[in-house]
Amino acid sequence: MGRLDGKVALITGGARGMGKSHVRHFVSEGARVVFGDVLDDRGAAVAGGLGEPSCRYVHHDVTSEAQWAAAVAATLDAFGRLDVLVNNAGVLKFARIADMPLADFRQVLEVNAVGCWLGMKAVIGPMTAAGGGSIVNVSSIEGFTGAAGLSAYSASKFAIRGMTKAAARELGRFGIRVNSVHPGGVLTSMTLGAAGAADDIDPDAFVKSMPLSRFAEPVEISRLVAYLASDESSYSTGSEFIADGGVLSGPGY
């Protein structure tokens, strides 16, 4: 028996990085998954590798309300219900405030924060019809603390943290739980690209300052997300779950 047997999940940003790991792990735990992205070739390759019966890919721009409606409809058409939403899609643009164009700041907020809000709104109806569900919003440790060069990213991740709590208050009466996950450094192209863009950050020093002294593998975050999607976390809502190797435990970050 898988932890997610019988569950139907919609996952955003599933074509690469943590999202791809979430898709694979959910399928391995027994879920049927529809996942979206704007990287269609990569998304189709992930779905093809997992098999048509349990996994479907759809083109999905999370900043579009119409594409949210289409993704939810595709999930219901494919599997008849919707139990889990993982708001994973995100972008990161590294630039100091003085150097960041307003358009870049707005794009990060649109994808990371507005996309998350649209997703929660889009699934209320089908999750209520299913008798409840679980929404997992992927934030970051930057939803607790800021870092130079990450003003837009931090703003969006703080927003996800706040929206999660508000949504939990609103949706609990429908049996819908809403929690946020806050990863630290994870071995993905987005994280490593940000580290490369920050010429005043020493990645080795950052790792040495962590109690666990290493970056996470994506599947280590996927396991936490799957726990929150499952019935094992049935009394958890409006909460923050940190997986950062101890970065936020004290001085050194």
Image: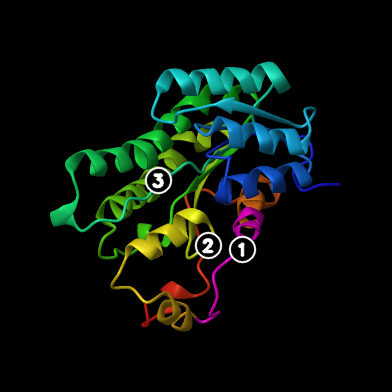
> Which residue range is magenta in the image?
211-223
Q: Residue at x 52, y 62 (%)?
A: 186
Q: Callout 2: helix, strand or loop? A: loop
The residue labelled by disc 2 is 186
Indicate the position of residue 204 as horizontal and vertical percent values.
45, 79
The answer to which of 33 and 181 lies nearer the viewer is 33
- Callout 2: few (<14), some (14-19), or many (20+) C-alpha neighbours within 10 Å? many
Q: Earlier in the sequence, mark 3 or mark 2?
A: 3
Q: Earlier in the sequence, mark 1 or mark 3?
A: 3
Give the quarter of the image for residue 249. Answer: bottom left
Q: Callout 1: helix, strand or loop? A: loop
The residues tagged by marks 1 and 3 sit, at their Cα atoms, a distance apart of: 19 Å
Indicate the position of residue 25 as horizontal and vertical percent values.
71, 48
Q: Are marks 2 and 1 in contact (CB under 8 Å)?
A: yes
185 to the left or right of 155: right
Asked if residue 218 lies in the magenta stretch, the reply is yes
Going by the numbered disc 3, the residue's amino acid type is: Val
109 to the left or right of 46: left
**Furthest-right residue in this view:** 1
Q: Is 17 above or below relative to 209?
A: above
Res 133 seen here: no
The residues tagged by marks 2 and 1 sit, at their Cα atoms, a distance apart of: 6 Å
Indicate the position of residue 173 as horizontal and vertical percent values.
52, 34
Question: Is the image coloured rainbow, by chain, by secondary structure, or in one colour?
Answer: rainbow
The residue labelled by disc 1 is 217
Q: Residue at x 78, y 46 (%)?
A: 28
Res 152 seen here: yes
Give the quarter of the image for residue 197. Answer: bottom left
Q: Are marks 3 and 2 in contact (CB under 8 Å)?
A: no
72 to the left or right of 130: left
